[in-house]
Image (cartoon, grey):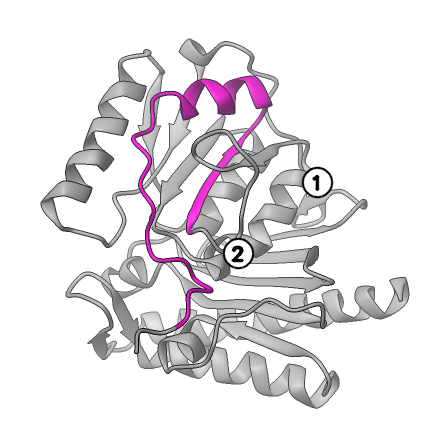
Amino acid sequence: MADLWQNAMDHAVALARTAGAVVREALQDERKVMMKSSSVDLVTQTDQKVEQLIIQSVKDKFPTHRFIGEESVAAGEACVLTDSPTWIIDPIDGTTNFVHGYPFVAISIGFAVNKQLEFGVVYSCVEDKMFTARRGKGAFCNGRPLQVSDQKEISQSIVATEFGSIRDPETVDKVLSSMRKILCIPVHGIRGAGTAAVNMCHVACGCVDAYYEIGIHVWDVAAAAVIVSEAGGVLMDVTGGQLDLMSRRVLAASSRSIGERISREIEAFAPVRDDAPPPQ
């Protein structure tokens, strides 16, 4: 199976490059924008085009494999991770960035077997940075090995997060309160690239020491989770417990001590799970 999964990963890298070229070309054109759950939860025709491109290519090469894709789920398909080989796809992570021409836009392709993530590919296509990792084989950016920072002091750390697309006042208050508490630890600063996958890859690179967010989805984090782990980082729930990919909550850190320190300041809440049954 090892060679088969390597073949799948090589195909994912090639697909990410092809998709990245589509995204870069679309950035030069007018981008038709549509809304999903709210006025800040956006989708474009390019998101849909890229996802269809990836899924069709994988179906042709690996016809028995399953898929969890952002736009497929938005269209009504179930978000269920089984033991079958499954591709977890975010065709454009950072759609709002894409709409505005903000230069952090990524194609994210994760792959799981028996519910265990086997590899992840994140292509930050405007930067032309290809992040890759395979379980037990290390993490890389454009072929160069990645390693998380060795920062042990939370007061010397930089933390990444996002505001998310849930904008009811109660949720926004919790998000801002968490940021305030983390800033006042104090930390060196808070940053955000506007894409979960890229923020997590920045943890893997060592340029930020932790990233947390509530409200993301499994397709936002699956690929980058492998990259963080293989770069020596840790993954957990925002409360400090075990990461649940379907919970829509993630904390990635360079070390468990940094992660757990940040988790104590986060006002956790529970969005509707990705694998929740649809409302009747």
User: Considering only vertical position in the picture, is 209 above or below 43?
Assistant: above
Task: Say what amino acid the circle numbered 1 marks.
Answer: Glu
Q: On the image, numbered disc 1 is attached to which residue?
A: 230
Look at the numbered disc 1 and give the secondary structure of its residue.
Answer: helix
Tell me the quarter of the picture where residue 82 sits: bottom right
Q: Residue at x 80, y 44 (%)?
A: 136
46 on left or right of 207: left
Task: Say what amino acid the circle numbered 2 marks.
Answer: Asp
Mark 2 is surrounded, within 10 Å at the Cα level, by few (under 14), some (14 to 19) or many (20 or more) other residues, namely: some
Q: Which range of residues does the magenta coloring cover? A: 248-277
Q: Is residue 279 visible?
A: yes
As for residue 230 lying within the magenta part, the answer is no
Q: On the image, numbered disc 2 is attached to which residue?
A: 128
As for residue 257 lying within the magenta part, the answer is yes
Q: Residue at x 54, y 58 (%)?
A: 123
> What percent of the width, then of the height, locates residue 85?
72, 71
Query: 33 or 219, which is in the foreground?
Result: 219
> What percent of the width, then of the height, locates residue 68?
53, 72
The tag earlier along the polypeptide, 2 or 1, is: 2
Q: Residue at x 68, y 31 (%)?
A: 232
Q: Residue at x 70, y 42 (%)?
A: 144
147 on left or right of 37: right
> What percent of the width, then of the height, locates residue 87?
62, 70
Query: 98 or 58, which is in the foreground?
Result: 58
Look at the numbered disc 2 and give the secondary structure of its residue.
Answer: loop
